[in-house]
Amino acid sequence: MLPETLASPAELRAHALSELHKYMAGFPAEAAGLKAIADLLGDTSADPFSRANMQGHITTSGLVYDRNADKVLLIHHRTLNRWLQPGGHHEGLDRLDVSAAREVEEETGVNVRSPNAQSLDAPLIDIDSHAIPANPAKGEGAHVHHDFLYLFRGDESAPLSPQWEEVHGVRWVALEALLSLPSARFGRLMSKLQRGL
């Protein structure tokens, strides 16, 4: 098992490529649409995790469901002005699932890690590339996020503690509500969840 923090940027890149290849093996119908991510991770001339890379960079997120598996945790993203799963830019040399767990906890206050667990045991359930508009306030041009989304379980009775600099709000919503949100990704996720992932 890999440690939570990897030893070098090369090891992190190899980890991300391994996650991508395992995902493509599990979801072969999506493989053609993931070529840009494979190319990004295979190009050693640029850092695929740096938010300064305007060709695109890796992000991580988490879809958190409650103990009854009938609600999911969403944030209202301050910049994009949409309800989304919590997530953000990858930082440091953390494994991708560890990065996703940290982002969930930072943006919502909900802990998705068991204190005694040797592993997060979080399945990678979706990879998605999506365009991000320019943000002059942050000095960022338009670019692409290549997001690795992991599935976690969280305690819906835990107090929510939104990261107000990043989000307008946090709430648990009925799982079916994902289908009403304007994102083809949520429809794809619902299909996967209904198949028992």
Image (spheres, rainbow, N blue to C red):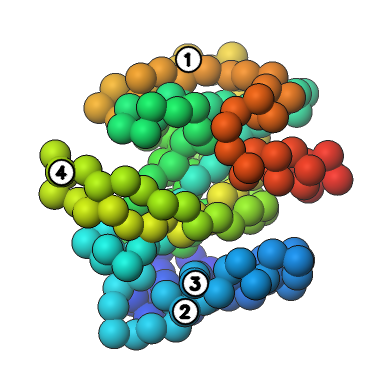
How far, Cα to Cα, is label 4 from label 1? 34 Å
Residue 87: x percent and y percent? 44, 42
* Residue 34: quarter of image: bottom right
How far, Cα to Cα, is label 3 from label 4? 25 Å
Closest to the camera, between mark 1 and mark 3, is 3
| Mark closest to the chain's N terminus, 1 or 3 | 3
Q: Residue, x 83% and y 39% (percent of image)?
A: 194
- Residue corresponding to mark 3: 36
- What amino acid is at disc 3? Ala
- Disc 1 on helix, strand or loop? loop
Q: Is there a contact, CB below 8 Å, between mark 4 and mark 1?
A: no
Q: Residue, x 38% and y 27% (percent of image)?
A: 81
- Disc 4 on helix, strand or loop? helix
- Disc 2 on helix, strand or loop? helix
| Mark closest to the chain's N terminus, 4 or 2 | 2
Residue 66 located left or right of residue 138 = right
How far, Cα to Cα, is label 2 from label 1? 41 Å
Closest to the camera, between mark 2 and mark 1, is 2
- Residue corresponding to mark 1: 159
Closest to the camera, between mark 4 and mark 2, is 4
- Residue corresponding to mark 2: 39
Residue positioned most to the right: 195
Q: Is there a contact, CB below 8 Å, between mark 2 and mark 1?
A: no
- What amino acid is at disc 2? Asp
- What amino acid is at disc 1? Pro
Residue 106: x percent and y percent? 37, 34
**Is residue 188 among what the camera can see?**
yes
- What amino acid is at disc 4? Pro
- Disc 3 on helix, strand or loop? helix
Residue 167: x percent and y percent? 35, 26
Which is more toward the observer, 34 or 151?
A: 34
Residue 168: x percent and y percent? 35, 20
